[in-house]
Amino acid sequence: MTVTALLTSALGRVRSVLPARADFEAMGRSPRQDLLAGLTVAVVALPLALGFGVSSGLGAEAGLATAVVAGALAALLGGSNLQVSGPTGAMTVVLVPIVARYGPGGVLTVGLMAGLILIGLALLRAGRSMRYVPAPVVEGFTLGIACVIGLQQIPHALGVDEPQGEKVVGVAWRALADCLASPNWTAIGLSAGVAAAMLAGARWKPTIPFSIVAVIAATAITQVFHLDAAAPIGDLPSGLPAPSLAFLDASALGSLLVPAVAVAALAALESLLSATVADGMTVGQQHDPDKELFGQGIANLAAPLFGGVPATAAIARTAVNVRTGASSRLAALTHAAVLAVVVFAAAPLVSKIPLAALAGVLLATAIRMVEVGSLRAMAKATRSDAAVLVLTAAATLALDLVYAVIIGLVVAGALALKAVAGQARMEQVDFRPDLPGEHSDEEHALLAEHIVAYRIDGPLFFAGAHRFLLELSEVCDVRVVVLRMSRVTTLDATGALVLKDAVEKLNRRGIAVLASGIRPGQRQALDAVGALELLRPEGREYATTPEAIAGARTHLERAGLLPSAHRPHRIRKAAR
């Protein structure tokens, strides 16, 4: 390959991870809604940024610098319209031993190196591998994070000093014991009132940002009635440090490489999983994993210059962003801008917000993160999916998210391989359209009628579902697709979800989908995710393929779409 070709390929890779014009055009569609969502997220993010900065060992100023600088750059250059980035609790756990061993300068250097690693991963298109994470792992991770967020707020919600400890369950239990010994009814009332207002308000008037209303009301009550028992946020730093590379020590780069790889891996994992969760909480949003890695890389490259700690997407803040109606990256940019204003101008006002009120916001957010319908579907699909979901959630709660995802992936892979090994055939998913010249004249005639039949051979589970079923939704020049399911050997929740998605996409394009030969063992997973509901009302499920083909012709005849015998037809090959 010539130098010119290499440069062209490299430039193509760089362009592929840069944001497109459409990403910024979306910011003008619902500006008011996005501005309100960003303001809400900023209110929630402020104490988190301060707390995570302090707990990392670099101080509150470092947390604010990360939230402002990394939050803005990741919003501008990332691959998700809804993602909110900044310092996180998971990252803090990784940074504490680095500070103890290498000092604050070591943490800033690690952040800089992690940013370069993330940019490299984006250019290598490593983010696309996240699509193979099984749905039960994502659902279990989300459930576990929701529990962690809720438990973390217990001390502030109860108005007690936060007990020492690393495990959130133990900290929450000791906080509850302290509260029982000396209840702080003011803090309990404020946190419960804010949470109740958000949950009830979301059902009554979803468009109103009840989190802002509730926090303002709680702050006003504490000031008017002089409720000293409700501890406020407290004094805030008055500015950000000037950008500098004075912390960089070239002689320490070698010893910091391993910590930098760990930080980059955590940033990539948490950011991509957070983006996946955000997609699942919305309709019509889809993140680009490689662009997301690139945005996080640039953010982590810049944050250390201002004294900021390594950043990643924050699931709690992203969930608040989604739940308050954000539709574009303008919301995340607003969050960063508001925090910047707080740093330079509004610190005295925000310092009066009670911590209990913010705890109520996060408690309500944690509750709303749990999608009961999705959890029920995963649990009912197969025993393996239910086991992976529960194990991932428990590991997230008891260990941390990195171990949780690794455990979930290993267990899901082992169970899937066990299921495949128990089948007579061990073939990959194979879609074979009935093409002219390969089969009978009858099947050739189907193409002339714009009917295509696909036979699915082998297992249909998380490891191969996306690659083949997403291609299925791209078939062209057909009016009816017949899915021949009799040779599917294994079907899990992820395969059923992707199959449902492909059917919905075809239906939206006016293409009817019929199925034949669905086995009893496949019905449980298909029914749990609602895939069968797309077929039953229209009578589009058949026992055999000949019956399905007859049904396809009947459908075309009723719709007046059967081609005339005297009319020529142009036939294209269906996508394999």
Image (cartoon, rainbow, N blue to C red):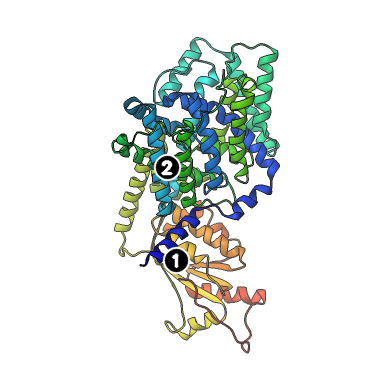
Kind of residue at badge 1: Met
Name the image quarter holding residue 457. Answer: bottom left
User: Mark 1 highlights which residue?
Assistant: 485
Horizontal placement of 247 versus 505: left or right? left
Q: Image point 61% across, 88% down: which residue? A: 565
Whether residue 398 is visible, yes or no, is no
Q: Quadrant of residue 8?
A: bottom left
Residue 359: assigned label: none
Can you say which quadrant of the picture contains the C terminus? bottom left
Looking at the image, how many numbered discs can be counted on the residues?
2
1 or 2: mark nearer the eye: 2
Residue 181 horizontal/vertical position (percent)? 49, 10
As rendered, which of 158 and 389 lies closer to the eye?
Answer: 158
Q: Is residue 558 above or below residue 4?
A: below
Which structural element holds mark 1? loop
Query: Which of the two residues, 12 or 358, is positioned nearer the viewer here?
Result: 12
* Image height of 381 relative to 437, above or below: above
- Residue 347 placement: quadrant: top right
* Amino acid type for the residue under numbered disc 2: Gly
Q: Which residue is located at x 68 percent, y 39 percent? A: 206
- Is residue 128 in sight in this rendering? yes
- Quarter of the rendering occupied by the N terminus: bottom left
SS of the residue under disc 2: helix
Residue 339 location (% of width, % of height): 59, 31
Q: Is residue 498 left or right of residue 100?
A: right
Question: Which residue is the site of mark 2?
Answer: 115
Per the model, the C-alpha gap separating discs 1 and 2 is 46 Å
Which residue corresponds to the image point at 35% horizontal and 53% vertical from the top-left? 416
- Nearer the observer, 77 or 444: 77
